[in-house]
Image (spheres, rainbow, N blue to C red):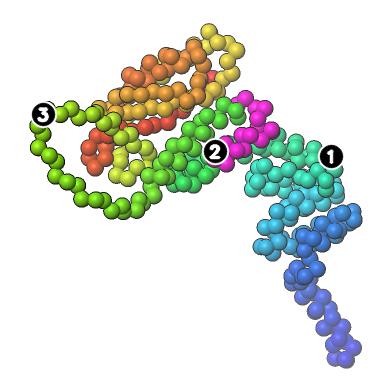
């Protein structure tokens, strides 16, 4: 083999190796460089930089990474890929909106259209995830998630939707309950107590003030929740309220006492004025196997959702 032939073979081999093993993102590849290329309308080059940064954990975690990739895709007319990227951004941060100073009205309109389509679905997904955390007694995580959902309900995109607005009190109720349950899960520090003096001999009959029994919550240590024995809901009077939208959601705050009876019912979210009274009267007739703590019956609070479906 001649020297020239050997060099040609080596060059061909090197080109093949480079094709299979592209160079990692270098110092010249950065979000700042992609932004600069985008602003100079070199969208292909900007997208190439971002694509090389995909496997760079630090760069891809930058809050500008996803949005600038979407902008490049939109500028290049790759709408389907752009929509997929927008969905990923909104699932990570549902409150994201592109900057008014750096993006055109057309691009902002694309994002707003995607937000209108996706936010109700994203809200429902996050609500379901928060409820799963609540049900598995991860109350601190559930409380954090429900708080973020309350904030998300203030988003103008969701504010105008009656079906989403109806969830505000439901979410707030679960948030309050999760917060309270999270507090009961935290180990309390031991507090030194002063010696208690021996009680003086009573000289006359004494009256003791009645002490209200403690009402336990889901997740309280050593507490087994009540089990329903009989409960039913009255039929919804559709003929009297034809204009009421279906799929309404109501919320009741119920206390089941040591006897398994419903001692308190509070309407946290009304279903309908014509229905609430019948609903409360019906709930008061429900019977439970009472909750227990260390084997003894105790009072227990439940948040109950009422859904009116077709």
> Residue 245: horizontal and vertical position, in percent?
59, 18
The residue singled out by tag 1 in the image is 105
Cβ atoms under marks 1 and 3 closer than 8 Å:
no
The residue singled out by tag 2 in the image is 127
| Distance in Å between CA atoms under marks 1 and 3 | 84 Å
Upstream in sequence: badge 2 or badge 3 = 2
Quick one: 258 or 78, which is closer to the camera? 258
Residue at the bottom extreme? 2
Q: Is residue 238 magenta?
A: no
As drawn, the label of residue 204 is 3
Quick one: 164 or 4, which is closer to the camera? 164
In this rendering, does residue 213 appear at all? yes
Question: Which numbered mark, 1 or 3, is in the foreground of this view?
Answer: 3
Upstream in sequence: badge 1 or badge 3 = 1
Quadrant (top left, top right, bottom left, bottom right) of the C terminus: top right
Residue at the top extreme? 240
Quick one: 65 or 257, which is closer to the camera? 257
| Distance in Å between CA atoms under marks 2 and 3 | 59 Å
As drawn, the label of residue 113 is none
SS under mark 2: helix
> Residue 280: horizontal and vertical position, in percent?
40, 18
Which region of the structure is painted magenta? 147-163
Locate residue 32 relative to residue 262 in the image: left or right.
Answer: right
Write down the quadrant of residue 1 in the picture.
Answer: bottom right
Q: Main secondary structure of the magenta part?
A: helix
| Distance in Å between CA atoms under marks 1 and 2 | 31 Å
Residue at position x 63%, y 34% in the image: 154
Upstream in sequence: badge 1 or badge 2 = 1
Write down the quadrant of residue 118 in the picture.
Answer: top right
SS under mark 3: loop
Residue at position x 24%, y 51% in the image: 194
């Amino acid at each position: 083999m001649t020297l020239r032939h050997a060099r040609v073979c080596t060059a061909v081999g090197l080109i093949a190796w480079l094709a299979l093993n592209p160079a990692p993102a270098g110092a010249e590849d950065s979000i700042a460089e992609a932004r600069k290329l985008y602003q100079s309308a070199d969208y292909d080059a900007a997208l190439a930089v971002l694509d090389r940064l995909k496997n760079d954990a630090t760069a891809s975690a930058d809050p500008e990474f996803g949005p600038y990739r979407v902008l490049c895709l939109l500028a290049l007319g790759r709408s389907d890929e752009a929509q997929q990227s927008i969905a990923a951004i909104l699932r990570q941060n549902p409150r994201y909106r592109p900057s008014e100073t750096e993006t055109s009205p057309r691009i902002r309109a694309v994002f707003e259209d995607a937000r209108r389509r996706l936010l109700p679905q994203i809200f429902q997904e996050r609500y379901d995830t928060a409820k799963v955390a609540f049900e598995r007694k991860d109350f601190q995580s559930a409380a954090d998630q429900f708080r973020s959902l309350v904030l998300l309900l203030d988003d103008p995109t969701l504010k105008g939707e009656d079906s989403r607005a109806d969830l505000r009190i439901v979410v707030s109720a679960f948030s309050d309950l999760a917060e309270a349950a999270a507090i009961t899960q935290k180990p309390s520090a031991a507090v030194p107590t002063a010696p208690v003096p021996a009680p003086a001999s009573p000289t006359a009959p004494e009256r003791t003030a009645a002490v209200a029994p403690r009402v336990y919550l889901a997740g309280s240590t050593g507490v087994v929740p009540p089990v329903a024995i009989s409960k039913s809901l009255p039929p919804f009077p559709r003929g009297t309220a034809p204009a009421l939208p279906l799929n309404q959601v109501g919320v009741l705050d119920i206390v089941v006492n040591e006897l398994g009876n419903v001692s308190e019912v509070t309407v946290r979210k009304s279903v309908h004025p014509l229905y609430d009274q019948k609903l409360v009267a019906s709930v008061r007739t429900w019977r439970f196997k009472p909750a227990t703590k260390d084997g003894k019956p105790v009072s227990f609070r439940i948040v109950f959702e009422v859904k009116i479906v077709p």
